[in-house]
Amino acid sequence: MIPNPGRLLPPARRIGPAVILVLVGGYAVLWFAARPGGQPTTSYVGQFFGAEAVLLLSIGLVLISTLPWVETWFDGIDRAAIWHRRVAISGVVLLIPHVVLAANPYKSSLGPPLAIIGAAGLVILAGWAILPRWRAMLPGALHGPVLAIRDAPGVRRLRTMLSGYEQWRSFHRFTGLFVAAGFAHGLLDGTPFSHAPVLRWTLVAVGGIGLAFYVYREVLARHFVPLLDYQVDSVREVGPGIAEITLVPLGRPVAFAPGQFAMLFLEGKDGWHRHPFTITSSPRERALSFAIKALGDDTSQLREFVKPGMPAVIGGPFGRFNHEKGTSSQLWIAGGIGVTPFLSWLRTLDDHPLRGPVDFFYLCSSADIPYAEEIKTLADGHDMVHLHFVNTGSEGHLTAERVMADIGKSPGTLSVFLCGPAGMVQSFQTGFRHAGVASRHIYREHFDLR
């Protein structure tokens, strides 16, 4: 047994998004307030878009630095990762009007090649990142043509080469170099800078800070972020396509709060693999467990090659998905493998007691429900937990309207915690807002960190 870490999560602040909006808006005001005379409007607007792109991309570099205050300001590193994706894609989009509108007849010899390198690399990264989500980003009428192109022989081979998480992650590490190329291009070829030093030095500050965080992440972070050595103790099947991996520490164990996730490093036949997984065990247990579902090539291979006795490394923990931040009346909804944070909560109720009654809905597509017996036993041991198993294969999709009718609770005093497939979670979020649950009382865990 290890000491109970207690309340590991400081109060949520969620000021990060507001800070981003203030920075972007303030930078726009500065550019147009400090505009020097003699600058053609079209070219100046184009260069302004380029400067905003550098700002957004630099913010993106800050957000993936893994520094603790980033997680605090965004109420979870998963939300920081989502905002990283948003600002990075927005920055890449702003490169379009920058390229179209900006013009400098006296451009340097080095500036244009740097611009091409930076823009090409960032566009490839953005496209690669959104490829797994293309259905959600394109209208339904375009799905057929896109599928036809996707399944063409040459494209199919390219998809196979680019489908691995490790390939994407390795290329993603060059993000800072592409931003640096664009930043250097701006300093070399920006026409207003010789007439408005404040614009030059603010760009230097913006780009310099972003690149400093990039250097920290790539060079220094490994010396400050604790990585703990573990060993695989057991691997067992807990449901269709789901394996639970249990690890034992070789030294100091990780201290975490129920519902948090960690970076799990496991060695495979082609090197070390790194994935974020929610911890399913209780903080009082010395062993650490993760439930892994075969959702892609990497996770399928993990379950095949991981054997007892193999080394493992744990980084973290991260995340702020915590029922203690909710109201006294709560609703938990898990879909499939999304049960993992709730399982950790249930296993730790003696140390982290509920504030009031909880209705827990666990949705699965078949009658073979992972952890069903253990969850039932844990729920039976706590009078305030009301368990609802839902077989969506036979009972159909559950809706927020049906849930509210079943539990009979007032939406004004209800907190909702969601974890599962993105489509399911988004549908419930919309449904509960329409039912009267306040948006600030709807919490979700984000699995799609990438």
Image (tube, helix red, strand yellow):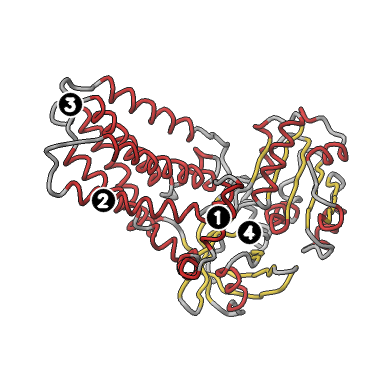
From the top left corner, tell me how far across and down residue 272 is, in percent.
47, 72
Query: For residue 145, which numbered disc appears in the image?
Result: 1
Mark 4: few, some, or many residues within 10 Å (few <14, many ≥20)? many
- Residue 88, image x and y in percent? 41, 44
Mark 2 element type: helix
- Image height of 337 relative to 73, above or below: below
Answer whether labels 2 and 1 touch (C-beta < 8 Å): no
Q: CA distance from mark 1 to mark 4?
A: 40 Å
Q: Residues within 10 Å of mark 2 (few under 14, many from 20)?
A: some
Give the percent coordinates (x, y) of residue 418.
70, 45
Query: Between disc 3 and disc 2, whose residue precedes?
Result: 2
Whether residues under marks 4 and 2 lie with C-beta atoms below 8 angstroms apart, the answer is no
The Cα atoms of the two marked residues, 3 and 2, are separated by: 26 Å
Callout 1 secondary element: helix
Residue marked by disc 2: 116
* Residue at mark 2 to residue at mark 1: CA–CA distance: 30 Å
Against 266, is 276 above or below? above
Q: Is residue 64 visible?
A: yes
- How far is disc 4 from disc 3 in space, using C-alphas? 52 Å
Residue type beneath disc 1 = Pro
State the residue position of label 3.
Answer: 196
Disc 3/disc 1 C-alpha distance (Å)? 49 Å
Decide which of tag 4 and tag 2 comes sooner along the chain: 2
Name the secondary structure under disc 3: loop
Which circle's residue, 4 or 3, is located before the other in the chain? 3
N-terminal label among 3 and 1: 1
